[in-house]
């Protein structure tokens, strides 16, 4: 079985490289996707095991991690010699990768509605989020079949000999990606501007307690602000590579493809670190480990005690939503 390539890199692109180059690209792709699979699975497992994480904000992170996990899994498996597995691989990889982009926009929307608009009804959007994410992902996966030749035995599953197939890929995959990047970036800008104005007002009024609250909010927002950067960092080389391949078909750059598959494959790992490994998760893990680690060992590692005793950080959405219950 020859592993199929993930959506960013057109399988037909591989035909322009030597067997040694293809082997390197496949190894990099598999290794990056495996790291993302492990990181995302860890966040999914934490959510399932720790009931204290079952807050609305972290539920969105759970579905993001779940999408990343399945995107990474289907980016690894595949069999170009079997038409059915080609369909299953490419539809699934496309579907869950696009879903990952869209879940980040639901988190940005929740943050904006809670912090900027001061609304506490974000949980009411749960079903709408699911319809938006899964429905859009399904539509993009179906539309991508335009101009595509599935199931042909060869080096990869998703072979698109016609220019219409390449255009469809740009629209259905990179369209949602860069729309998510622009929306998340704009949302973070508005939230950051609102906190800046609130902080300046607190300083002018001499409101010490409000200043401390703003600092806590800013700490949380700074972590949320990594998300647009993660999407940009993960997919910038893939976007450049795809556009270059569209403009200059038949001429591929190995180092650009190397960076393409490497960074794109690590998106799930980056998301799991930025979104999932907050103080609430670390504290939940420390409390469970306390049941198994002897006290003399815990005393020997003061870092462990600090993680156990730390209070959950102000995560904005969670605090405001829970405050209304």
Image (spheres, rainbow, N blue to C red):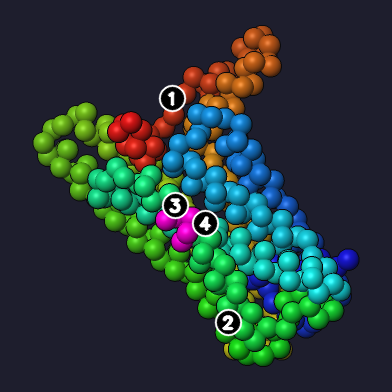
Whether residue 34 is visible here, answered yes or no, is yes
Residue contact between numbered discs 4 and 1, judged by CB atoms under 8 Å: no
Identify the mark nearer the N-term, 4 or 2: 2
User: As drawn, is 204 to the left or to the right of 283?
Assistant: left
Real-space Cα separation, disc 4 to disc 2, in angstroms: 24 Å
- Is 69 located above or below residue 236 in the figure? above
Real-space Cα separation, disc 1 to disc 3, in angstroms: 31 Å
Whether residue 255 is visible here, answered yes or no, is no
In the rendered structure, find residue 168 and report the number of the disc placed on it. Answer: 2
Q: Of discs 3 and 4, which sits in the foreground? A: 3
Identify the mark nearer the N-term, 3 or 4: 3
Residue at x 42%, y 56% (from the top left corner): 128
Real-space Cα separation, disc 2 to disc 1, in angstroms: 48 Å
Q: Residues within 10 Å of mark 2 (few under 14, many from 20)?
A: many
Residue 130 belongs to the span the image colors magenta: yes
Query: Which residue position is annotated with label 1?
Result: 311
Residue 161 belongs to the span the image colors magenta: no
- Is 149 located above or below residue 117 in the figure? below
Tell me which segment is drawn in magenta: 128-132
Identify the mark nearer the N-term, 2 or 1: 2
Query: Which residue position is annotated with label 4?
Result: 230
Real-space Cα separation, disc 3 to disc 4, in angstroms: 26 Å
User: As drawn, is 26 to the left or to the right of 208?
Assistant: right
Q: Quadrant of the N terminus?
A: bottom right
Real-space Cα separation, disc 2 to disc 3, in angstroms: 29 Å
Query: Which residue position is annotated with label 3?
Result: 127
User: As drawn, is 135 to the left or to the right of 250?
Assistant: left
Residue at x 67%, y 68% (from the top left corner): 91
Identify the mark nearer the N-term, 2 or 3: 3
- Dot 4: element: helix
| Residue 70: x %, y % from top left | 66, 55
Identify the mark nearer the N-term, 4 or 1: 4
């Amino acid at each position: 079985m020859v592993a199929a390539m993930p959506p960013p890199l057109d399988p037909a692109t591989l035909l322009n490289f030597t067997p040694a180059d293809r082997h390197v690209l496949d190894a990099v792709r598999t290794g990056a996707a495996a790291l993302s699979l492990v990181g995302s699975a860890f966040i999914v497992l934490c959510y399932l095991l720790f009931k204290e994480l079952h807050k609305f904000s972290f539920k969105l992170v759970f579905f993001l991690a779940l999408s990343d996990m399945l995107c990474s899994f289907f980016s690894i498996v595949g069999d170009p010699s079997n038409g059915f597995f080609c369909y299953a691989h490419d539809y699934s990889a496309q579907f869950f990768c696009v879903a990952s982009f869209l879940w980040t926009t639901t988190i940005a929307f929740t943050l904006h509605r809670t912090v900027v608009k001061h609304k506490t009804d974000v949980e009411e959007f749960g079903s709408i989020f699911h319809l938006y994410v899964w429905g859009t992902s399904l539509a993009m996966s179906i539309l991508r079949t335009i101009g595509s030749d599935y199931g042909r035995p060869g080096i990869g599953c998703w072979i698109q000999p016609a220019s219409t197939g390449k255009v469809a890929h740009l629209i259905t995959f990179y369209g949602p990606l860069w729309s998510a990047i622009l929306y998340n970036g704009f949302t973070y800008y508005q939230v950051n501007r609102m906190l800046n104005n609130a902080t300046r007002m607190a300083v002018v009024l001499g409101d010490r307690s409000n200043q401390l609250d703003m600092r806590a909010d800013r700490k949380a927002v700074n972590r949320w602000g990594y998300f647009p950067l993660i999407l940009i960092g993960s997919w910038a080389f893939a976007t450049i590579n795809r556009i270059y391949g569209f403009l200059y078909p038949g001429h591929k750059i190995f180092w650009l493809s190397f960076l393409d598959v490497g960074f794109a494959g690590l998106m799930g790992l980056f998301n799991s670190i930025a979104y999932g490994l907050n103080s609430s998760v670390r504290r939940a893990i420390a409390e469970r480990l306390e049941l198994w680690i002897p006290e003399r060992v815990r005393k020997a590692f003061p870092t462990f005690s600090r993680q156990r005793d730390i209070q959950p950080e102000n995560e904005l959405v969670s605090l405001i939503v829970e405050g209304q219950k």
